[in-house]
Amino acid sequence: MYVCVCKGVTDHQIRQQVSDGARSWREVREATGCATQCGKCACYAKSLTKEALQEARMDADMGLAYAV
Ligand code: FES
């Protein structure tokens, strides 16, 4: 689903950024360009990023995210 229409950013891309190592909304925004134009998507994109970060932390706590 598109979260940011201006930059064509999807929820999958935001989750993928977190999965690839982004650890803040700022990092996700810089990597995707999300919320850098009209800004109407910022609130939802931030909450989606927060949710993805919480999931990543839970996975890390269970030893799933950073296993090599
Ligand atoms: Fe994301 Fe406009 S919808 S910047």
Image (cartoon, rainbow, N blue to C red):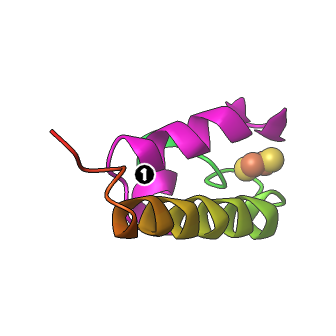
Along the line of sight, which residue is nearer the eye, 11 or 37? 11
Of 53 and 7, which appears nearest the observer?
A: 53
Percent coordinates x, y for residue 39 in the rendering: 75, 60
Q: Report if residue 32 is visible in the image.
A: yes
Give the image quarter of residue 43.
Answer: bottom right
Place residue 19 in its image quadrant.
Answer: top left
Quadrant location, the N terminus? top right
Please report the bounds of the magenta region as a residue range.
1-29
Is 31 situated left or right of 4 in this image? Answer: left
Type of amino acid at the residue the image marks with label 1: Glu
Q: Is residue 63 left or right of residue 6?
A: left
Q: Position of residue 66 (x, y in %)?
A: 25, 50
Residue plotted at (60% across, 61% down): 49
| Residue at left offset 68%, top offset 50% | 37
Residue to which mark 1 is pinned: 30
Q: Identify the residue at image location x=35%, y=40%.
A: 20
